Amino acid sequence: MKEKAHRYLTLFLTTLEISAFTFGGGYVIIPLMRKTFVGKLKWIEDSEMLDLAAIAQSSPGPIAVNAAILIGYKSGGIPGALLSILGAVLPPLVIISIISAFYQAFRSNKYVSMCMTAMSAGVAAVVIDVVISMVIDVLKMKRLLPLAMLVITFILVQFFSVNIIIMIFAAGAVGYIDYALGRKKAK
Protein backbone atom coordinates (compact mmCIF):
# COMPACT_ATOMS: atom_id res chain seq x y z
CA MET A 1 0.00 0.00 0.00
CA LYS A 2 2.86 2.35 0.85
CA GLU A 3 4.43 1.72 -2.56
CA LYS A 4 1.16 2.58 -4.31
CA ALA A 5 0.82 5.84 -2.35
CA HIS A 6 4.41 6.74 -3.25
CA ARG A 7 3.70 6.04 -6.93
CA TYR A 8 0.60 8.25 -6.84
CA LEU A 9 2.50 11.07 -5.13
CA THR A 10 5.35 10.75 -7.64
CA LEU A 11 2.86 10.77 -10.54
CA PHE A 12 1.11 13.89 -9.24
CA LEU A 13 4.31 15.80 -8.43
CA THR A 14 5.94 14.83 -11.73
CA THR A 15 3.03 15.98 -13.88
CA LEU A 16 2.71 19.12 -11.73
CA GLU A 17 6.40 19.92 -12.22
CA ILE A 18 6.37 19.24 -15.96
CA SER A 19 3.23 21.34 -16.41
CA ALA A 20 4.49 24.19 -14.21
CA PHE A 21 7.85 24.61 -15.91
CA THR A 22 6.94 23.99 -19.54
CA PHE A 23 5.92 26.65 -22.02
CA GLY A 24 4.40 25.74 -25.36
CA GLY A 25 1.74 23.12 -24.75
CA GLY A 26 1.49 19.43 -25.55
CA TYR A 27 4.14 19.20 -28.22
CA VAL A 28 6.68 20.44 -25.69
CA ILE A 29 5.36 18.38 -22.78
CA ILE A 30 5.39 15.04 -24.64
CA PRO A 31 9.23 14.80 -24.87
CA LEU A 32 9.55 15.79 -21.21
CA MET A 33 7.03 13.13 -20.20
CA ARG A 34 8.90 10.64 -22.34
CA LYS A 35 12.21 11.55 -20.71
CA THR A 36 10.69 11.22 -17.24
CA PHE A 37 8.33 8.26 -17.49
CA VAL A 38 10.35 6.20 -19.98
CA GLY A 39 13.92 7.20 -19.17
CA LYS A 40 14.00 8.19 -15.52
CA LEU A 41 11.15 6.31 -13.82
CA LYS A 42 10.97 3.44 -16.36
CA TRP A 43 7.22 3.08 -15.83
CA ILE A 44 6.46 3.04 -19.57
CA GLU A 45 8.24 1.43 -22.52
CA ASP A 46 9.43 3.68 -25.33
CA SER A 47 7.07 2.05 -27.86
CA GLU A 48 4.14 2.53 -25.46
CA MET A 49 5.01 6.21 -25.10
CA LEU A 50 4.91 6.59 -28.87
CA ASP A 51 1.44 5.03 -28.89
CA LEU A 52 0.26 7.19 -25.97
CA ALA A 53 1.53 10.33 -27.72
CA ALA A 54 -0.32 9.37 -30.91
CA ILE A 55 -3.55 8.73 -28.99
CA ALA A 56 -3.16 12.00 -27.05
CA GLN A 57 -2.70 13.91 -30.30
CA SER A 58 -5.69 12.38 -32.03
CA SER A 59 -8.07 12.68 -29.05
CA PRO A 60 -10.19 15.80 -28.58
CA GLY A 61 -8.83 18.29 -26.07
CA PRO A 62 -5.41 19.59 -25.11
CA ILE A 63 -2.57 17.19 -25.93
CA ALA A 64 -0.85 17.78 -22.58
CA VAL A 65 -3.96 16.84 -20.60
CA ASN A 66 -4.69 13.84 -22.83
CA ALA A 67 -1.11 12.61 -22.44
CA ALA A 68 -1.28 13.10 -18.67
CA ILE A 69 -4.52 11.10 -18.50
CA LEU A 70 -3.06 8.24 -20.55
CA ILE A 71 0.24 8.14 -18.69
CA GLY A 72 -1.55 8.41 -15.35
CA TYR A 73 -3.91 5.59 -16.23
CA LYS A 74 -1.08 3.42 -17.54
CA SER A 75 1.00 4.09 -14.41
CA GLY A 76 -1.68 4.03 -11.72
CA GLY A 77 -5.13 3.17 -13.06
CA ILE A 78 -8.05 5.55 -12.55
CA PRO A 79 -6.60 7.21 -9.42
CA GLY A 80 -3.36 7.77 -11.35
CA ALA A 81 -5.26 9.33 -14.24
CA LEU A 82 -7.14 11.68 -11.90
CA LEU A 83 -3.96 12.71 -10.07
CA SER A 84 -2.08 13.32 -13.30
CA ILE A 85 -4.95 15.44 -14.66
CA LEU A 86 -4.84 17.53 -11.49
CA GLY A 87 -1.05 17.85 -11.74
CA ALA A 88 -1.22 18.85 -15.41
CA VAL A 89 -4.10 21.33 -15.08
CA LEU A 90 -3.30 23.07 -11.80
CA PRO A 91 -0.25 25.16 -12.88
CA PRO A 92 -1.84 26.61 -16.05
CA LEU A 93 -5.05 27.31 -14.14
CA VAL A 94 -3.17 29.30 -11.48
CA ILE A 95 -0.95 31.09 -14.01
CA ILE A 96 -3.85 32.02 -16.31
CA SER A 97 -5.86 33.25 -13.32
CA ILE A 98 -3.02 35.54 -12.27
CA ILE A 99 -2.37 36.77 -15.79
CA SER A 100 -6.06 37.50 -16.38
CA ALA A 101 -6.07 39.74 -13.32
CA PHE A 102 -3.24 41.80 -14.85
CA TYR A 103 -4.08 41.24 -18.52
CA GLN A 104 -3.93 44.87 -19.61
CA ALA A 105 -0.48 45.39 -18.09
CA PHE A 106 0.87 42.18 -19.67
CA ARG A 107 -0.65 42.89 -23.05
CA SER A 108 0.96 46.28 -23.53
CA ASN A 109 4.36 45.50 -21.97
CA LYS A 110 7.04 45.41 -24.69
CA TYR A 111 9.36 43.18 -22.61
CA VAL A 112 6.64 40.57 -22.14
CA SER A 113 5.97 40.73 -25.87
CA MET A 114 9.67 40.22 -26.68
CA CYS A 115 9.86 37.26 -24.26
CA MET A 116 6.82 35.64 -25.90
CA THR A 117 8.40 36.04 -29.34
CA ALA A 118 11.65 34.46 -28.14
CA MET A 119 9.79 31.60 -26.45
CA SER A 120 7.88 30.80 -29.63
CA ALA A 121 11.19 30.12 -31.39
CA GLY A 122 12.13 27.69 -28.62
CA VAL A 123 8.75 25.99 -28.86
CA ALA A 124 9.24 25.55 -32.62
CA ALA A 125 12.60 23.86 -31.98
CA VAL A 126 11.06 21.46 -29.46
CA VAL A 127 8.20 20.60 -31.85
CA ILE A 128 10.73 19.79 -34.57
CA ASP A 129 12.63 17.61 -32.07
CA VAL A 130 9.42 15.70 -31.26
CA VAL A 131 8.67 15.12 -34.93
CA ILE A 132 12.20 13.88 -35.61
CA SER A 133 12.20 11.53 -32.60
CA MET A 134 8.80 10.11 -33.57
CA VAL A 135 9.97 9.53 -37.14
CA ILE A 136 13.08 7.78 -35.79
CA ASP A 137 10.85 5.58 -33.61
CA VAL A 138 8.72 4.68 -36.62
CA LEU A 139 11.87 3.86 -38.63
CA LYS A 140 13.13 1.63 -35.79
CA MET A 141 10.01 -0.52 -36.15
CA LYS A 142 11.37 -1.65 -39.54
CA ARG A 143 7.86 -1.93 -40.86
CA LEU A 144 6.80 -0.42 -44.14
CA LEU A 145 3.15 0.33 -43.27
CA PRO A 146 3.71 2.94 -40.50
CA LEU A 147 6.36 4.69 -42.60
CA ALA A 148 4.11 4.69 -45.68
CA MET A 149 1.19 6.02 -43.60
CA LEU A 150 3.44 8.78 -42.21
CA VAL A 151 4.53 9.92 -45.67
CA ILE A 152 1.10 9.59 -47.31
CA THR A 153 -0.67 11.40 -44.47
CA PHE A 154 1.85 14.26 -44.57
CA ILE A 155 1.50 14.64 -48.35
CA LEU A 156 -2.31 14.51 -48.30
CA VAL A 157 -2.69 16.99 -45.45
CA GLN A 158 0.10 19.38 -46.43
CA PHE A 159 -0.26 19.51 -50.21
CA PHE A 160 -3.85 18.44 -50.90
CA SER A 161 -5.54 19.97 -47.82
CA VAL A 162 -7.25 16.71 -46.84
CA ASN A 163 -9.04 17.14 -43.51
CA ILE A 164 -6.92 15.82 -40.65
CA ILE A 165 -9.97 14.14 -39.06
CA ILE A 166 -10.43 12.05 -42.19
CA MET A 167 -6.76 11.09 -42.04
CA ILE A 168 -7.02 10.11 -38.36
CA PHE A 169 -9.98 7.82 -39.05
CA ALA A 170 -8.32 6.39 -42.17
CA ALA A 171 -5.08 5.72 -40.26
CA GLY A 172 -7.08 4.12 -37.45
CA ALA A 173 -8.89 1.87 -39.93
CA VAL A 174 -5.66 0.88 -41.67
CA GLY A 175 -4.01 0.23 -38.29
CA TYR A 176 -6.91 -1.94 -37.17
CA ILE A 177 -6.88 -3.93 -40.41
CA ASP A 178 -3.11 -4.41 -40.08
CA TYR A 179 -3.55 -5.54 -36.47
CA ALA A 180 -6.37 -7.97 -37.37
CA LEU A 181 -4.38 -9.44 -40.27
CA GLY A 182 -1.33 -9.80 -38.01
CA ARG A 183 -3.35 -11.69 -35.41
CA LYS A 184 -4.88 -13.89 -38.08
CA LYS A 185 -1.44 -14.65 -39.48
CA ALA A 186 -0.09 -15.43 -35.99
CA LYS A 187 -2.80 -18.08 -35.47
Image (tube, rainbow, N blue to C red):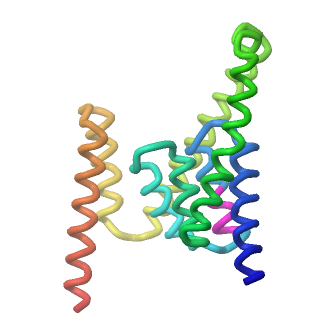
| 187 in magenta | no
Q: Main secondary structure of the magenta part?
A: helix
Measuring 59% from the left and 60% from the top, which residue is drawn there?
82
- Give the image quarter of residue 24: top right
Question: Which region is colored magenta?
Answer: 33-39
Measuring 51% from the left and 52% from the top, which residue is drawn there?
66
Measuring 48% from the left and 61% from the top, which residue is drawn there?
52
Looking at the image, residue 118 lies above or below residue 24: above
For the C terminus, the quadrant is: bottom left
Q: In this view, does 24 lie to the left or right of 140?
A: right
Q: Which of 80 and 128 is in front in this view?
A: 80
- Whether residue 124 can be seen here: yes
* Relative image position of residue 70 (x, y in whole percent): 52, 61
* Relative image position of residue 20 (x, y in whole percent): 74, 44
Measuring 28% from the left and 64% from the top, which residue is drawn there?
175
Q: Nearer the viewer, residue 111 or 156?
A: 111
- Give the image quarter of residue 166: top left
